[in-house]
Structure formats: C-alpha cells, structure tokens
Image (cartoon, rainbow, N blue to C red):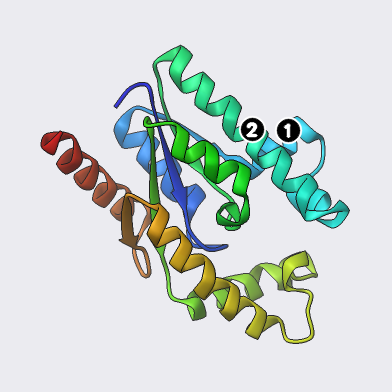
Amino acid sequence: MKNQIIIITGPKHSGKTLCAGALAKISGGVAADLDELVTKKAGKTPRELFKEGPEIFRKAEASVLASLALTAKSENSLIIIAAGGGLIDNPEALALLSQHKEIITVYLDVPPETAWQRILHTASVDGELPPFLKTENPKETHLALHKRRAEGYKALAQFTVPADNKSPEEIADEIVLLLDGKSSTN
C-alpha cells in the first residue's frame, strides 16, 4: 500500500481522525488530519478561515490536499488522511481526488442523529456551534446537509463503511479487509 493516500471522509464527528490513526497503526502508514494541517499551514483554524469566507477555507483545504498527494508520490509512502466533513463541498479538492489514481476514498457512514448528538456535545464544550450550523434551525440545517453530503460521499467513495457503534480499530480492520479485497482483484 505504498505510494498511496487513503482519505477517510464522513460527516462531522463520525470518527475520521481516530479511524485514520487506527488504520495507520495497523498498516504502517502515517495518519494526518486535514483540518490540523490546514491550521498549521494557514496559521488559523478551519473555523477561523470559514468565518473569513468559506471559499478561503476551501482553497486552503485543497492546497494542503494537493501537497499531500505530491508527498505520497515522492516519498513512496502510505498517508491516511482524516478529511473535514465538508470536503465534498470543495470542487477543487474533488477534482484533485479524481486526478490521482493512488487516492482511495472511504466514507464512514453514521446516522444523522448520531452525528447531531456529537455536534451538540462538542458545542457544549466549545460554547458555540460550527459556523455552518448557525442558522435559524441548526438541527434542520444539519439534517439537510448530512443527507446531501452523505449522497455525495457515497457516490465519490470507493468504499462505504458503517461506523456507528464501532471502535476506530474495528472500522480500521474493516477498511484493511476492503483494501485487501480490492488489491486481490486488480
């Protein structure tokens, strides 16, 4: 699995970062969180960039993803990326995904209510909802966004893994089995 990028996608709080870490541990790859890398490169969090304008954040996100694709090729390494929940809304990043055959996309499928409860928990700790949910009815906004994004991710991803009530390690094991099945059919 060298010279490859596995992108773990899914809704906000679906367990992408923990799953990427678990997958890196069992596969010998390197895990990276796309939002953390954007923060490191831009000097601002995705939330701060998003407040300046969604397009500013999306451009930074696509730029970091492009750099990771080059790194995977040049270093002949396996990089597992936990993407932000809104990657599906970034046309530049999606174009990049389709241009690189070494990128495999995995969608972590969680029910909208599970994601909503996790968002509420984090908001109670942070003191605010994410900017994209600051609407008249945040739950309705979330449900509509979750449904639309889930359809997009399922169409984009090579693999969809049900991720509700599973540990990151269980999900990572399922991904390895799916990837092994894919490589044996090639």
Q: Nearer the viewer, residue 124 or 67?
A: 67
Mark 2, residue position: 64
Callout 1: 10 Å neighbours few (<14), some, many (20+)? Answer: few
Q: Nearer the viewer, residue 166 or 12?
A: 12
Q: Are marks 2 and 1 in contact (CB under 8 Å)?
A: no
Foreground mark, 2 or 1, reads 2
Mark 2 → mark 1, Cα distance in angstroms: 10 Å
Q: Is residue 158 left or right of residue 123?
A: left
Q: Name the residue: 71% across, 70% down.
A: 123
Q: Position of residue 104 (x, y in %)?
A: 37, 40
Mark 1, residue position: 40
Q: Position of residue 49 (x, y in %)?
A: 81, 48
Quadrant the C terminus occupies: top left
Q: Residue furthest top?
A: 74
Q: Name the residue: 79% across, 85% down.
A: 136
Q: Is residue 162 left or right of residue 95?
A: left
Instruction: Judge whether 115 appears above or below 81 on screen.
Output: below
Number of numbered discs overlaid on the protein picture: 2
Instruction: Judge whether 82 appears above or below 96 on screen.
Output: below
Q: Position of residue 102 (x, y in %)?
A: 37, 30
- SS type, badge 2: helix
Q: Is residue 141 left or right of residue 148?
A: right
Instruction: Judge whether 50 appears above or below 32 on screen.
Output: below
Q: Position of residue 164 (x, y in %)?
A: 38, 69
Q: Name the residue: 85% across, 57% down.
A: 51
The disc labelled 1 sits on which kind of residue? Lys
